[in-house]
Image: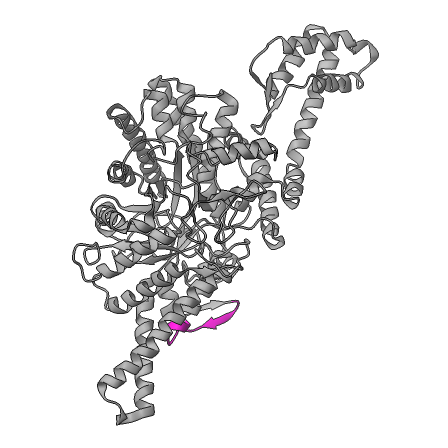
Amino acid sequence: MKVVKRDGSIVDFDRSKIVTAIRKANASVDEGERVTDEQIEAVVEYVEKKNRPRLLVEDIQDMVEQKLMEAGKYELSKSYIIYRYSRALVRKANTTDDSILSLIKNSNKDVMEENSNKNAVMAATQRDLIAGEVSKDLTKRVLLPEYISEAHEKGILHFHDADYFLQPIFNCCLINIGDMLDNGTVMNGKLIESPKSFQVACTVMTQIIASVASSQYGGQSVDISHLGKYLRKSREKFRAQAIEALGNELSEEQLNKIVEMRLKNELKAGVQTIQYQINTLMTTNGQSPFVTIFLNLKPDDEYIEENAQIIEEIIRQRYEGIKNEKGVYVTPAFPKLIYVLDEHNCLKGGKYDYLTKLAVKCSAKRLYPDYISAKKMRENYAGNVFSPMGCRSFLSPWKDENGNYKFEGRFNQGVVSLNLPQIGIIAKGDEDKFWELMDERLKLCFDALMCRHNALKGIISDTSPVHWQYGAIARLEKGETIDKYLYGGYSTLSLGYIGLYEVTKLMKGVSHTTEEGHEFALRVMKYLRAACDRWKKETGLGFALYGTPAESLCYRFARIDKALYGTIEDVTDKGYYTNSYHVDVREDIDAFSKFTFESEFQSISSGGAISYVEIPNMRHNLTALEDVVKFIYDNIQYAEFNTKSDYCHCCGYDGEIKINDDLEWECPQCGNKDQRKMNVTRRTCGYLGENFWNVGKTKEIKARVLHL
């Protein structure tokens, strides 16, 4: 018999724990109120004879109280209840000791693997993680209503980023980098004036990025098109210097050659500054800044030629990579790159198709950039094209007092995600019960999101001057509250969801790619979207439906549900749930059909969504990749590539990855051992959770791994 503990973990039934608890209660009452050892044994046998596959620990305690009352031992029962209550208080009083100590000992697997961009072994990073454990503890016990904390613990919903909830900071944003560069900013009390050259502009931009990243917990994005004017300033400066130094000694052709040579060096140095600064700076949360660079050639941009040069250099340097400590060129985690496809570069004879061909070549080697279709985005966002905040969360269109659309300088207040499969498990195919449960749980999500909103109300601009006083978001006065930016849809609150495939399978017995499943899945998505729209109308807040990319949450929800409801075929047996609306990884579907199918769900999930396809041997399949990119432009808003073959995300190695003597997958080129940063084709089931060979390092297990 198994026992499900309060944290969702499962342990073997241990009769001695019941015996110990009753004896401790016995010792606290008069002798006449005590039970004998035989009576204690009878209580234990009563529990054992239930013979259930699994019992909740609370159910066991209820049975013990029942048997003590039946024996007429009312004082003893009361003492046992007090003991039980005191243990609950102890758990509530301190829930961080074990997690923090295990973190220091490098054995806290959940925390150490939650963010692949953080090196959880480093002392500097551990300071942030320790603070996060304290924040999660206080969030659970004090800051959130008990019913929200309970819903999170039971896997009904997920209250994202509880490790930062203690602080008055928000999730992600679009930095108003144009305003900060053009009008200057302040960092660490020092005035930073508008740059006079491209390289200085690149340096200032990276300093802004690092400062912003240290005062929020989610991703940030910058639109590279704001740098075009500074590249032109450098060109004009070099031309003036050459004329001043050499006067009429040079022909126009010679002058242009010198200017362009100097500009090329400036361009290369500026882009290197961006790449190396972002990858060597460390923010206060123990990682490189989580930043996305938006590569968008706007058709009406007066600096479009300069921006084309900048984009070309950024992609060229990403293709080359950065040397690691072994001198091997690897793929930097940041900045993320998003490349916009438009009429002039969608591989249909446009002027800038050469940039797209270079981007495809880079994707084949480095898996970046991702791709946004300007055509589809304009259809979904009232004619606008803009970057996600970080790499996935999108804002809703919003107009300022002059009727102009504004996206940069806006942000997300926080995210709460709903566990769709759990609703399907409980409903057991009964649609009336399903929608009733859906309403109950959406109300919980709404309340949890309002906790996010209310935590930011009354926050003053001094909490993060770079955001609120010096232009990243606003230019408020010292002491002024940020409240006006929380309302009217200026910022968003995101409702995420996990497992549309699994809930469709549970309710209809088929995938959501079938006709019957598709109809049900669309109803679910539209219901979620309608809830967000209704909340927005009722509150004046910017609620949005978000196809969350929380890969770790896919495992958490599945793990909790398996503990509570057992093994369910094609649902909890996989060890993970399918992310948001995505097609299950095991379905046989080609890239074009997958994008066509998922595009419909992206338009509903307008608060953020991305789709991906796996393509074998990408580096040797450039023509196929170009065909997919053309298809993206006409059919889906936002997409990325992955590969089916062995592949190391760090260095781009696409040969065979083998097991080393320590029973770890290891890239033979760069030495990467982090399985979250590599593809291994032998893992055919798609499971990426705890590896079965970790139970013991034996020759037999090693042989089994190598065989698989």
The answer to whether residue 23 is left or right of residue 307 is: right
Image coordinates of residue 151 in percent, x first then y, are 50, 30
The verdict on residue 155 being magenta is no
Q: What residue do we see at 37% from left, 76% from top? A: 196
Residue 401 vs 433, above or below: the answer is: below
Residue 344 vs 134, above or below: the answer is: below
Q: What residue do we see at 27% from left, 93% from top? A: 249
User: Which image quarter: residue 549?
Assistant: top left
Closer to us: 323 or 27: 323
Closer to us: 687 or 456: 687
The verdict on residue 191 being magenta is yes
Q: Residue furthest bottom?
A: 248
Image coordinates of residue 39 in percent, x first then y, are 74, 7
Q: Is residue 57 visible?
A: yes
Which stretch is magenta? Answer: 188-200
The quarter of the rendered structure image containing the N terminus is: top right
Closer to us: 351 or 87: 351
